[in-house]
């Protein structure tokens, strides 16, 4: 009698445990149906499809962003479960529309469009050495571009890299990284490549790339295809910078020279300011030290560049 009772209790306990087991993809359809049928949720396999819910497209997109731009699985799950798109990522979208609008306006008013022009050298926004007292030019040159190829590259990187980063870190943080890169681009050009006209958002774009790249570089072992991502980003960036250097020094100049220094100084700003303002979900001791080093490097470079422009009018 005791043996029988024990057997029944074990069976009941086993059934109860089976009922509480999570339904993973490894369970067969018939097994899932049997467990749910015990709970009277379904009567047959034909009704089992009522229990299956398709993952919404928005949730799939959020999970994809988490997988691509976060390094720890715990952070990915937390982000995927809690992201609501409120507030929406409006900074990158607004900047992209603004730059596209300015390019369209100048293309129409100047009556031409090609891969390297037009460059509106008389624009109220272009950075020029002889107009440095108009300090807004150190930032607003970003709305102008030297041709549709220049514009296309920047807009694609902004949307493919900047928009997901903004979804993860927020508009304020990504806006700070982007504008820090833009400012670093003009300040660096004012020191190292003084005879050029500066247009384009490459400083901000490379700041976004570098900020994300620094995170990947430190955590590529935890990311899927981490080494391939590093090689891919370096390859794309190298081709773009190489083309800019060639266009600056080797190509036949059909207009005023356009700087490439903004790419490099913008990337430096992204490496430093990115460590300062981007969310770190689990900061370690050595990362706190890197935070202070990044702050010191960024402040030192920025203050030096500002003083240089004041002392060399």
Image (spheres, grey):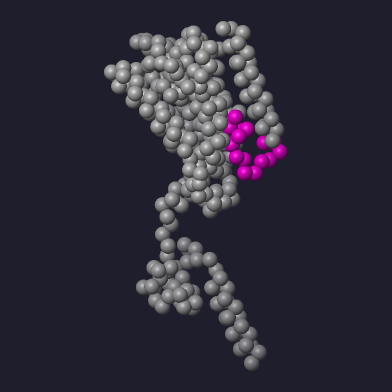
- Does the magenta run of residues contain 283? yes
The image quadrant that residue 294 belongs to is top right
Quadrant that contains the N terminus: bottom right
Q: Position of residue 91 (x, y in %)?
A: 48, 35
Can the viewer see residue 42 in this picture? yes
Q: Position of residue 306 (x, y in %)?
A: 60, 15
- In the image shown, does 120 or 188 lie closer to the viewer? 120
Q: Is residue 93 above or below residue 310?
A: below
- Does the magenta run of residues contain 45? no
Instruction: Residue at 61%, 8% (x, y): give it.
Output: 311
Quadrant that contains the C terminus: top right
Q: Position of residue 267 (x, y in %)?
A: 53, 25
Q: Is residue 95 left or right of residue 270?
A: left
Instruction: Residue at 47%, 22% (x, y): give it.
Output: 140
Instruction: Residue at 69%, 30% (x, y): give it.
Output: 292
Instruction: Residue at 55%, 21% (x, y): give it.
Output: 184
Q: Is residue 273 left or right of residue 36?
A: right
Residue that sits furthest to the left in the current view: 111
Residue that sits furthest to the bottom in the current view: 1
Q: Is residue 44 above or below residue 84?
A: below
Q: State which region is magenta.
A: 273-287
The image quadrant that residue 253 belongs to is top left
- In the image shown, does 23 or 42 lie closer to the viewer? 42
Q: Position of residue 205 (x, y in %)?
A: 48, 28
Can the viewer see residue 242 in this picture? no
The image quadrant that residue 120 belongs to is top left
Q: How many marks?
A: 0
């Amino acid at each position: 009698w005791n043996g029988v009772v024990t057997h029944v209790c074990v069976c009941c306990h086993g059934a109860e445990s089976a009922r509480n087991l999570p339904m993973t993809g490894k369970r067969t359809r018939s097994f899932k149906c049997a467990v749910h049928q015990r709970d009277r949720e379904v009567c047959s396999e034909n009704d089992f499809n009522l229990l299956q819910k398709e993952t919404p497209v928005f949730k799939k997109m959020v999970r994809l962003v988490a997988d691509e731009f976060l390094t720890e699985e715990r952070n990915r799950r937390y982000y995927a479960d809690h992201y609501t798109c409120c507030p929406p990522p409006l900074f990158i979208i607004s900047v992209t529309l603004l730059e596209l609008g300015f390019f369209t306006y100048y293309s129409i008013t100047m009556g031409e469009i090609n891969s390297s022009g037009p460059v509106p050298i008389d624009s109220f926004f272009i950075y020029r050495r002889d107009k440095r007292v108009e300090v807004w030019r150190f930032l607003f040159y970003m709305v102008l571009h030297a041709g549709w190829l220049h514009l296309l590259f920047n807009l694609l990187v902004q949307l493919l890299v900047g928009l997901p980063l903004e979804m993860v870190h927020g508009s304020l943080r990504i806006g700070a990284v982007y504008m820090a890169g833009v400012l670093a681009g003009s300040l660096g050009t004012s020191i190292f490549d003084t005879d050029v006209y500066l247009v384009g958002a490459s400083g901000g774009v490379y700041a976004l790339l570098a900020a994300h790249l620094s995170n990947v570089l430190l955590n590529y072992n935890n990311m899927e295809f981490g080494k391939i991502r590093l090689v891919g980003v370096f390859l794309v960036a190298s081709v773009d910078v190489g083309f800019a250097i060639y266009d600056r020094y080797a190509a036949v100049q059909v207009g005023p020279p356009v700087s490439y220094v903004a790419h490099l100084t913008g990337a430096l700003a992204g490496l430093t300011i990115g460590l300062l303002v981007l969310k770190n979900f689990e900061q370690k001791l050595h990362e706190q030290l890197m935070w202070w080093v990044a702050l010191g490097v960024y402040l030192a470079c920025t203050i030096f560049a500002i003083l240089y422009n004041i002392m060399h009018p």
